[in-house]
């Protein structure tokens, strides 16, 4: 058996170009020394949505053959050499505030249950040192990100409760503007942050939680960076200069992030990676509306089968633009060029973007391929280590120092 395995390895080595072998070895060395940390993965929410109560007992070891298409499971996390993950605990911003709080607590409970179910795989982490200890022990550090300011229901006490349960960041808004902050994808209501919104940022600083500015409007980004005493994060956003989506970060804000000491963790969602795909997806949505618009003026209104058939014809004639791993690397390159290599990381949004992902980045096993692409472009091992996890660890340490200073 051992002879057969060695022969298989030798055949792979012969079939693999020397440069690719070298990149793989370099990536492995980097990730042995530095934990790979993803800023945003929606696995807890999608497990809740698809599995219901079975989420508490389903075998999470290998979901690759599940009828539901998951990007995440334990086997693929291991193949991807993941060292730490901020698990997103997202709930719909359309829910009443109290329901948002209840569902947030349920999802925090799910994340906290992972180490109990798989103690040799996961361990809870809150600080940078927690992450390093988990990595040294061969565990995946599980951290919690609350993805929407509406989930605190206007209460700093609720925010403090989340912190006590281990939440490491709060995303100030989701897709909608809330009572104290404007969203990137809704009409502005406050011209950024309100006075209460500024208090939320300072309370996050006091608690040692990260201020997450993904999903917020540019004015909210600027206000939060101006107020925050600690480095900020964008848990899953990309570069607006490459793809002009309001969810992405402009060069002007990238320069503010650099001065603040924060980090922008690059998103894999095709609409945030490729401007061509963003425009195509807007056209596709418009066509679907043209066919189905209520109450009377949709071309095929009241005829769902005909509407579906006509939409399929449109899709066949208007193929989606190709989105690739290389384009994601372009965003990493751009952010490093504008803000500096100390201010970029990875925030995949796995299990939060549907079934469409860039070619080459289909699941959590593919992080090494992206890091190898950066190496192919001339990135040093030291700089790849920063992108993989070093930068977000530095930001976490900054938040911890701020917390200690504010306590004094």
Image: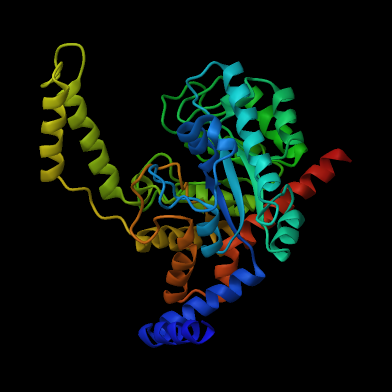
Q: Quadrant of the C terminus?
A: top right
Evaluate whether residue 276 shows in this view: yes
Q: Farthest residue in the right direction?
A: 408
Q: Farthest residue in the top direction?
A: 295
37 or 182, which lies in front?
37
186 or 34, which lies in front?
34
Q: Tally the marks.
A: 0
Q: Residue at x 10, y 38 (%)?
A: 313
Residue 220 x/y as whole percent: 54, 33
Q: How is the image coloured?
A: rainbow
Does residue 319 appear to the left or right of 213 in the view shown?
Answer: left
Q: Residue at x 64, y 53 (%)?
A: 261
Residue 311 x/y as whole percent: 15, 34
Residue 402 placement: quadrant: top right
Is 158 situated above or below 123?
above
Is 168 situated above or below 344?
above
Residue 381 placement: quadrant: bottom right
Residue 9 x/y as whole percent: 46, 83
Evaluate whether residue 194 shows in this view: no
Residue 156 x/y as whole percent: 71, 24
């Amino acid at each position: 058996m051992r002879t057969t395995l060695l022969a298989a390895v030798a055949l792979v080595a012969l079939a693999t170009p020397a440069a690719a072998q070298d990149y793989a070895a370099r990536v492995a060395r980097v990730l042995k020394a530095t934990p790979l940390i993803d800023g945003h993965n929606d696995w807890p929410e999608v497990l809740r949505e698809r599995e219901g109560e079975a989420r508490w007992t389903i075998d999470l070891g290998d979901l690759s053959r599940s009828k539901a298409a998951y990007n995440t499971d334990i086997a693929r996390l291991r193949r991807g050499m993941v060292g730490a993950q901020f698990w997103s605990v997202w709930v719909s911003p359309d829910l009443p505030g109290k329901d948002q709080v209840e569902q947030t607590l349920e999802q925090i409970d799910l994340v906290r249950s992972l180490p109990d179910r798989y103690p040799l795989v996961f361990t809870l982490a809150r600080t940078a040192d927690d992450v390093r200890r988990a990595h040294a022990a061969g565990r995946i550090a599980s951290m919690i990100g609350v993805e929407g300011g509406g989930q605190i229901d206007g209460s700093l006490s609720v925010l403090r409760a989340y912190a006590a349960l281990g939440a490491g960041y709060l995303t100030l808004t989701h897709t909608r503007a809330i009572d104290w902050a404007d969203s990137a994808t809704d009409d502005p209501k406050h011209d950024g942050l309100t006075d209460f919104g500024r208090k939320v940022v300072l309370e996050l600083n006091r608690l040692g939680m990260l201020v997450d500015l993904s999903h917020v409007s540019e004015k909210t980004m600027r206000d939060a960076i101006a107020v925050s005493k600690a480095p900020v994060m964008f848990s899953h956003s990309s570069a607006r200069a490459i793809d002009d989506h309001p969810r992405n970060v402009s060069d002007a804000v990238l320069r503010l992030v650099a001065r603040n000491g924060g980090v922008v963790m690059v998103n894999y969602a095709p609409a945030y990676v490729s401007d061509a795909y963003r425009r195509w997806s807007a056209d596709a949505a418009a066509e679907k509306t043209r066919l189905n618009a209520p109450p009377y003026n949709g071309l095929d209104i009241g005829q769902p089968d005909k509407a579906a058939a006509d939409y399929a014809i449109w899709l066949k004639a208007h193929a989606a633009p190709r989105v690739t791993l290389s384009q994601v690397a372009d965003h990493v390159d751009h952010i490093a060029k504008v803000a500096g290599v100390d201010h970029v990381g990875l925030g995949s949004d796995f299990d939060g973007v549907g079934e469409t992902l860039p070619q080459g980045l289909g699941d959590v096993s593919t992080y090494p391929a992206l890091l190898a692409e950066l190496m192919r472009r001339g990135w040093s091992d030291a700089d790849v280590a920063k992108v993989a996890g070093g930068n977000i660890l530095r930001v976490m340490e900054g938040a911890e120092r701020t917390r200690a200073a504010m306590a004094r």
